[in-house]
Amino acid sequence: MNEKLQIIFGLIGGLAMFLFGMNSMSAALQKAAGEKMKSILNFLTKNPVMGAVAGMIVTAVLQSSSATTVMAIGFVSAGLMSLPQAISVIFGANIGTTMTAQLLAFKLSNYIYPIIFAGFIINFVCKREKLKNIGMVIFSFGLLFEGIEIMGGVMKPLASSPFFVDLMGKVSGMPVLGVLLGMVMTLVVQSSSATIAVLQNFASQPAADGISSVIGLTGAIPILLGDNIGTTITALLACIGQSKNAKRTALAHSIFNISGSIVFLFLIPVLARFVTMISPSGNEIDVISRQIANAHTTFNIVCTLVWLPLLPVMVKIVTFIVRGKDVSESEGIKTRYIDEKLIHQPTAAMYMISLEISRLSDYTTAMINSLRSYITDKTTSAANEFADLVVIIKSLCTSITNYTTKLISEGGLTISQADQTAGLLFVTNHIERIADRSSEMEKIYRNNAAVGKSFSEEAVEGLKENVDLIGHIFYKSIEALKNGGPNTAEVINSAKEELRKEQRILNKAHILRVKDGRCSPASTSDYAAILYELERAADDCVSIAEEALETVSFAELQSIANGSEPVKEENNDDKSE
């Protein structure tokens, strides 16, 4: 085979193995320790310094700054973390991601195959999910280093190539060229860890004297800075279509790396001397990989130390660039009626909770309508609207639940008040479950479309009719809460029976369509799953109505709060007697 082709195939094959190993290791680590990492992230972000430490720890463990960023953005969207906290986590994640380069600086070539074998055995033999994930981590770790070894092997001829020798000479003399080279490499590969690994391997190739690096530390640093800029562009691309806080977080990441790279571009000799001083001594080709890793770590630590005290400035910059309020910052996601000052006034507090639940029900109705729109046209705008409404509902449910629980725990409630307050909590929980079931339906539908499995027009029409029926049942349930009515139970149960009847018809019709080839057999389980979630949502609506008939009446709470005795509709006959 042609030598050039061997080099190209070796580079792309080794790179593919490296990226596969990196992604597999990150995925397995998240399965094995992801929930604990989320807890650490949530617990340690009470101030910017601890937020940076949390970001560093989580990224170092998970070996993925992307995973840490996703967690941080998720917490921001859920209202569990503020934008400054998320940005501090991103600062720390930049330090944590340098652990990959530090690991790669170790010479593990003699141990790669035993590591791969050990990981395979653990994953293959063990039955427990956690141990299997640990085995996959070890196996992927070995593949990652094997990819590096393959790339290193094919790079040796490049070190003596006149073209590359000339290019490296230009990079050393023109740092900006090195920055551009590193940036383009990262954009192509979409992984700064991979491009830094390639840089470490190439720099470890000897020059003509057999002792010096073919590129040297001062030539490697500009490429390293370009890698850091390139990875921020990847983050910016990834946040397209996301929330404003997601865009601000990605933008903060970009400003962090770009500003640091520009400053260090003028301090390359200083950084090179410092890194040489803290790195092991020896022949340059033997220590250059560690020096590059240390330069990467130093760059991110210094940038973090500079930007951390300036966190409020960073927040102002990204908020100025990405203007407007995010869904999580809008008034829609905040409670409007419940007030901590009323916690010791149960009558007023319960009435305010009822007003908040009424508002919550409006968002839920809008969410059900949005789900129907998404099923109809599958547009990005419909998906975004649905996602925003789910975030609002989940946040409001959390706030109402916390407030209601506090009202119960504070004591001082009469037996009747305690029953009604528990009923309010019960209703809130069922509304949240409706949001969860709607999210599950949207997820199934979206995943189905993503893999090319589509429902027929008849199937989609049936789903729309079922969603409409859920909207009707929910409306009747909330109407029962607000106004009561002796025939509410019959109306809702009748509607639910109609839903079940429709679902039986839809299931049979779908089977016939599959038989006739009008629907894909692969979509059967997904279709059934959506119908199941619709039925469960109907159960939640019925439960809300039953609670309204037994314990909760918004009209009664309003009457009591206004100081007048409520007149219960079901007692009218008794009073007339």
Image (spheres, rainbow, N blue to C red):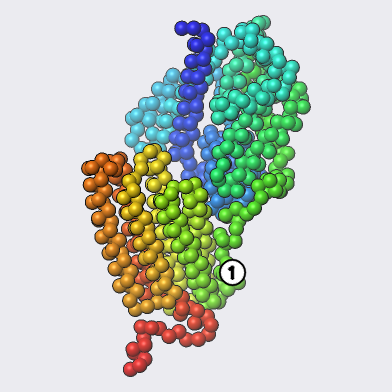
Near-viewer residue (400 or 499): 499
Q: Position of residue 267 (x, y in %)?
A: 76, 27
Q: Quadrant of the C terminus?
A: bottom left
Res 252 visible: yes
Residue located at (76% from left, 25% from top) = 270
| Residue type beneath disc 1 | Glu
Which residue is drawn at the image coordinates 54% and 42% (left, top)? 70
Above or below for 152 versus 541: above
Quarter occupied by residue 295: top right
Which residue is more in the foreground, 272 or 227?
227
Q: Position of residue 227 (x, y in %)?
A: 63, 27
Nearest the camera: 299 or 394?
394
What residue is drawn where x is 64% and y is 10%? 163
Give the structural element (helix, strand or loop) at label 1: helix
User: What residue does disc 1 label?
Assistant: 340
Q: Does 435 sit above or below residue 291?
A: below
Q: Position of residue 168 (x, y in %)?
A: 67, 14
Whether 496 is drawn above or below 62: the answer is below
Quarter-of-image position of residue 544: bottom left
Q: Residues within 10 Å of mark 1 (few under 14, many from 20)?
A: few
Q: In this picture, is 510 found above or below 233?
A: below
Which residue is pictured at 30% across the width and 41% down the height? Answer: 520
